Amino acid sequence: MAKIQMTTPLVEMDGDEMTRIIWQMIKDDLICPFVDLKTEYYDLGLEHRNETDDAVTVESAEAAKRLGVAVKCATITANAARVKEYGLKQMWKSPNGTIRAMLDGTVFRAPIVVRGIEPCVSNWKAPITLARHAYGDVYENAEIRIPGAGKVELVYTAADGTEERELVHEFDGPGVVQGMHNLDASIESFARSCFNYALDTRQDVWFSTKDTISKKYDHRFKDIFQEIFDAEYKERFDEAGIEYFYTLIDDAVARVMKSKGGFIWACKNYDGDVMSDMVSSAFGSLAMMTSVLVSPDGVYEYEAAHGTVQRHYYKHLKGEETSTNSVATIFAWSGALRKRGELDGLPELMAFADRLEQATVDTIEAGEMTGDLALITTIENPVKLSTREFIQAIAKRLAA
Ligand code: NAP
Ligand code: MG
């Protein structure tokens, strides 16, 4: 059988621990037998990041900007324990943070829905994709613990020296105070990423803030989204038969719980942080969450939402059998291959991505799955497979 050809390479960002093992298995058993895979390879494994003083991370993000589509393996975010374990020159920054900052992107997280792994919320029939604004607010705040009586003001000093003041509070005893900011430019990028992704995936966008209470700060988010939607996206949304819908965050939460799913929920930074954990756990398993970083100018980086599954890796190193779920990493590859096919006009490559996803879903729905899913499935007598057996079971269906 002739292999499917590619024209432009994918940016391949390899990673760490158990997901690095899975990465190779996916390429060997699920992709390379069918596709003449072309990638520009960057090793983001912690050892190589350390050897290159993290230059490899920056190079990989530059490659993503140049080529447009990347697929990334989970990577270790260094902490004190990792500095010791790997003898690091320094505590390197999170690769995801570096890449996100360089692409100015928004992260969309969506669960992979299969029969037999049912969401806790029984009316959710289609995935809910969560888009989190990853800049500013409480994550880049300034805080003071107020020791006693005194006045706190916000002071804005313009370039020409003029001042604008706003009283925060007259303290008559101890307390706390916090200052936050955001940027029109960042909110605009966030809005465009959400609207582009909605057109791309043909889903409605819901956006929610607390604009009734925060009449300037949150209201600015609401206004920017509406202005950009009206000026740049309304017609294309009408043509695609999708909608943009703004509502108060409280109302959004209530509606999400009663919805059928199948839309993008755009959230401010903190709301997105909290709600993405709720949505992903309610859909069943972190190992079934995909994640895609979309830049406002249309660069796509696909990955699994989970980490490097360290505990399983140490078992693997001891020669013990593991049963690590590779679904989210497989869907990162299929997402990237499909997008590459779409951009390069390669319908065969797009069809292969669909087949790979279908074979993965069919395997689970036939009762063959990894241990994490076997514990929560509603399918009777599931067969628990090892990491490799699960990938081989998918390969068998793909080849059939
Ligand atoms: P993790 O790798 O997501 O794993 C936490 C636990 O969740 C695992 O021990 C396992 O539970 C379960 N799990 C996660 N993914 C699974 C899968 N594919 N199959 C089966 N079970 C799975 O998080 P972590 O252990 O907190 O972090 C490990 C490393 O990953 C850290 O160095 C962290 O910095 C990094 N990380 C990277 C990314 C990224 O690159 N995007 C994201 C998050 C974390 P059981 O042990 O109970 O089986
Ligand atoms: Mg969180």
Image: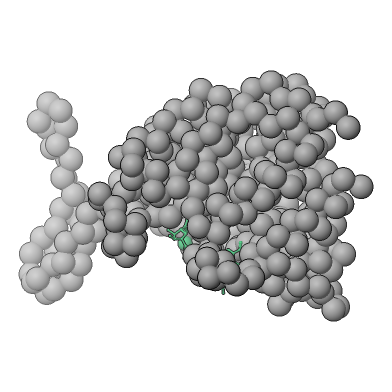
Numbered-mark total: 0
Q: Is residue 279 visible?
A: no
In front: 54, or 139? 54
Colour option used:
one colour
Residue at the right extreme?
A: 400
Is residue 392 shown above or below 57? below
Decide if residue 164 is on the left or right side of residue 393. Answer: left
Q: Is residue 46 visible?
A: yes
The x and y percentages for residue 218 are 42, 48
For image coordinates 70% across by 60% down, the residue present is 388
Is residue 163 shown above or below 377? above
The x and y percentages for residue 203 are 71, 43
The x and y percentages for residue 169 are 18, 61
Decide if residue 388 is on the left or right side of residue 72. Answer: right
For image coordinates 76% across by 72% down, the residue present is 384
Decide if residue 353 is on the left or right side of residue 22. Answer: right
For image coordinates 49% across by 27% down, the residue present is 63
* The quarter of the displayed image where residue 58 is located: top left
In front: 203, or 309? 309
* The quarter of the displayed image where residue 342 is located: top right
* The quarter of the displayed image where residue 344 is located: top right
For image coordinates 69% across by 35% down, the residue present is 337
The x and y percentages for residue 363 are 83, 59
The quarter of the rendered structure image containing the N terminus is: top right
Decide if residue 362 is on the left or right side of residue 311. Answer: right
